[in-house]
Image (cartoon, coloured by chain):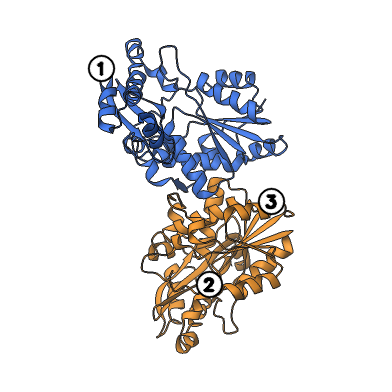
Chain colours: A blue, B orange
Amino acid sequence: MQIVGTIADARRAVAAMPRPLALVPTMGALHAGHLALVARAQATCASVVATIFVNPLQFGPDEDFGRYPRAFPADVRALEAAGVALVFAPSVDAMYPNGFDTTVDPGAVGMRFEGALRPGHFRGVATVCTKLFAIFGADVAFFGAKDGQQVAVLRQVVRDLGLPVAIEVVPTQRDVDGLALSSRNAYLSDAERAAAPGLYRALRAMTAAVERGETDRQRIVAAGRTAIRTPLREAYLDVVDPETFVACDAAPRADGVRELLAIGSVWLGSTRLIDNVPFAVAPLRAIAGAAR
Amino acid sequence: MQIVGTIADARRAVAAMPRPLALVPTMGALHAGHLALVARAQATCASVVATIFVNPLQFGPDEDFGRYPRAFPADVRALEAAGVALVFAPSVDAMYPNGFDTTVDPGAVGMRFEGALRPGHFRGVATVCTKLFAIFGADVAFFGAKDGQQVAVLRQVVRDLGLPVAIEVVPTQRDVDGLALSSRNAYLSDAERAAAPGLYRALRAMTAAVERGETDRQRIVAAGRTAIRTPLREAYLDVVDPETFVACDAAPRADGVRELLAIGSVWLGSTRLIDNVPFAVAPLRAIAGAAR
């Protein structure tokens, strides 16, 4: 496994790699969720490149860029064991040298929910990913479903700019108690960690309400809210269209199955966690048919 | 020569073309300046693709998008005669379908001069060119030197985002009286057309001042200003660094030849023209040597 830190070395290293080429962008501090991305990449592509870069552009001035967990030696061992061909681990200067000034802005999809709580976050995500896609000329890039709005943002950018890369989404990896794996779980105290699965329970309570026939967004959210108890504090719970992240009712449509997302975020002390659960609403016709 | 209007058809058409692949983005209404781009592309690349797209994103609400000259049949004949392999002439909907929302912003280089007079213009240029580069996977893209700030903006974006395309700049084509060729020259009345070369004379007066040893930006501009007479009205005249478009004195540097740009823009009635003349300042050491 090669490890490179400059864009020029990265381009040279991938030039001769068999295609299709998979890209797995990470901020390091790898857990089983990241390794699921690598495994899916290995299964579907001839070469896998992983990147480790804690991207300052996607952190606000009061956020955790400085204390974001870093575990480079362990990350490298895990990626090598997983069969990754190349790790690109640039410095901030290598990615953003003096004079760097370009921004990729995904528009409205990046202004809601996480974008509202973290102004500029998705511009930073869109900018770094556009650059990583361009450096590697990757055929497929792999992202975790847990960061559902990030997926929506990147699909928007790839579609709008015609970028020649496919976005593949890998289901969220969870601990046995349901907590979605996240590098930020390392910030939790024991008591916070014990309470953290309440977020997933809230999202499951929302999809359970939908399964009982509830379509009203506010009532679905209210069902989830019952699972958010101290020390959890709700940042948001909602039902959204997974493509636009516009909040909506879970009303069926006549023209086919409707894919939706129950999304949520909670504070635990100074740590904020996010999670989501996808669900589908059967088409109106099928429901009418079932009622006949 | 193939002519296609959709992104999917464009991708299919270029997939089999010999490399290197040249891209010549235009807004149509072609003149000898555009054909010089095609000729340079032909001379250096195996395949040449031209695009004809009047890009609404780079026009302000009060600008000339609606009346910008369109001459599709003549353009196609000229490109075919010039040996272009493919013309991509999409509709606005094909480039920006419903839901399109992504913007590429080049930062400060796009805020000065043309960017100040045309807010959002260079975001529109950066966005459409990033998309055209991605659609075609072009190896080299050709632009005219007349649009000097556009060149600076695109170099900034390509450098910052690591886009795998080289930007080639072709010298400005001029009419016999010095007027830079531009599709917007078609807007001029006979009297305005007769006065229009005053812009180029102003820029040449600026570089002549530099040749006489003037280094002060304000005095260089003052030298140019004497050539701006009614019906010309100055929008701006200045000396800038061609990479950043930051205004500066023409002072020599110790570490090598300094490339600079005399830039200018004038109003003629409701038409605004732009032009620029590159010049170089010898290194300080050489000047000191000459004085000994």
Q: Where is residue B196 in the image (x, y as percent from the top left)?
A: 48, 82
**Amino acid type of disc 3?**
Ala
In this view, B277 is above or below B158: below
A231 left or right of B77 in image:
left
Identity of the residue furthest to the bottom in this view: B191
Q: Which of A65 and B263 is in front in this view?
A: A65
Q: Nearer the viewer, residue A167 or B223?
A: A167
- Checking the image for residue B210, the label placed there is 2
Residue assigned mark 1: A229
Task: List the residue tagged with mark 3.
Answer: B15
Quarter of image, res A204 = top left
How many other residues sit within 10 Å of disc 1, few (<14), some (14-19) or many (≥20)?
Answer: few
First-in-chain label (2 vs 3): 3
Q: Can you say whether B16 is above or below A226 in the image?
A: below
Question: Foreground residue, B212 or A116?
Answer: A116
Q: Residue A199: x, y in percent?
A: 34, 20
Q: Residues within 10 Å of mark 3 (few under 14, many from 20)?
A: few
Q: How far apart are marks 2 and 3 (CA)?
A: 49 Å
Q: Which element type, helix, strand or loop, lies under badge 3?
A: helix
